[in-house]
Image (spheres, rainbow, N blue to C red):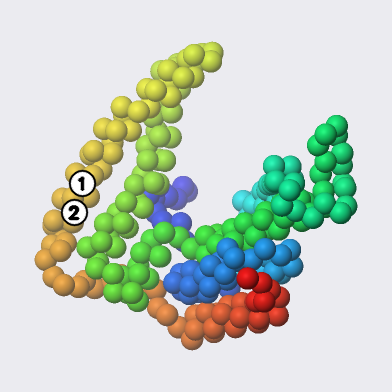
Amino acid sequence: MSVAVDPYAEVGADRRFLGGINPLAKLAGPFPAILLLVFVRDLTTPSVFLVLAYAVILAGTRLTRTVALILGVALPLGVVVFGVGMSVWIDASRIDRSVEIVSIGAWTLYSGALEIGFATSLRLAAIVALALIAGLTTTGPDVVRASVQQLRVPYRVGYTALAAFRFVPRFRHELDIIRQAHRVRGAHGGRFAVVARWWGYVVPLLAGAIRHAERVALAMDARAFGAHPDRTERHLVPFRARDVVFLGGCWVVSAVVFAALFPWTLG
C-alpha cells in the first residue's frame, strides 16, 4: 500500500536541541559575537568562536551529509584557500618581515603575511559558523511565524513572505514533472540538446508560476486576508524558558571570550 506524499509540504527543522529553540533566539544569540568579530585582528578570538560554533552545531543538530560537508570540507577548505590567498596578496611593506617562509625570485612570503591572512580567513569562518547555528536548524517559514508572533511584524508582510517560501518546493516539483515529460517524449541528445532542453524548461515553469500565483491570490481573498488587524495562528512558535537560557548563554559566553581575548588596548 503506497502512501501519498504532499510535494508542497514544508520540511521542518531537525527537532533536536537547536531545532527546539525559537528562531529569533538562534538569530539574536550569536549576533553580538558576529558583530564584534568584524573588528578582531588576532588569531585566537575567531578560533575560539569557531570551535564553540562547531560544538553547538554538532551537539544541537543531526549530522547529515550536508552538515558534514559544510563543517568538514567547505569551511576548513575555505580557511586554507582564503588564508593563503590573503597572505600572497597582502602588501609586504605593512607587515612584520622578520621571518621568511617562502622566497621565489624577488617575491617573499613572510610570517606576518601568513598571520594576517589566516586571521582574516578565521574571522570570516567564525562569522559563517555562528550564522550556521540558525541557518542549518531553522526554516524560513518558522522565522516568518516567529517574527509575526514575537516581533509583531504585520501579518500581511509575514504571510506574503510565507507564501513566497512555498513557491520553492512547488517549482521543484513542477521541474521534476517537466523533466519526466521530456524524457517520455525522447528529449535527449548531446551537449547542445542539454542547453536547449534547459531553455525549454523556462516557459512551462513561468506558466506554472503564474497559475500558482493566481491560485494563491484567490485563496487569500477567500480567507479575507488583510481584512482584520490580526489573524489566528495555526502554527505557534513560542518563546519559552529554554530560548531565554540559550539567548543569555550565548551573550554571556561571548562577553567572557571577548573580555578575556579581545585586544582592548589597541587603537
Q: Residues within 10 Å of mark 1 (few under 14, many from 20)?
A: few
Counting every numbered tag in the picture gives 2
Residue drawn 62% across the image and 56% down it: 124
Q: Which residue reaches farthest front? A: 93
Q: Is residue 107 left or right of residue 64?
A: right
Q: Position of residue 135 (x, y in %)?
A: 52, 60
Q: Split into 4 quadrants, where in the image is the C terminus?
A: bottom right
Residue drawn 67% across the image and 56% down it: 120
Residue drawn 56% across the image and 80% down it: 251
Q: Which residue is mark 1?
A: 215
Q: Are marks 2 and 1 in contact (CB under 8 Å)?
A: yes
Q: Position of residue 261 (x, y in %)?
A: 71, 75
Residue drawn 30% across the image and 54% down it: 163
Q: Is residue 37 visible?
A: yes
Three-letter amino acid code at the position of disc 2: Ala
Q: Which residue is mark 2?
A: 219
Q: Position of residue 189 (x, y in %)?
A: 51, 13
Task: State the SS at label 2.
Answer: helix
- Tell which of 98 and 46 is nearer to you: 98
Three-letter amino acid code at the position of disc 1: Arg
Task: State the SS at label 1.
Answer: helix
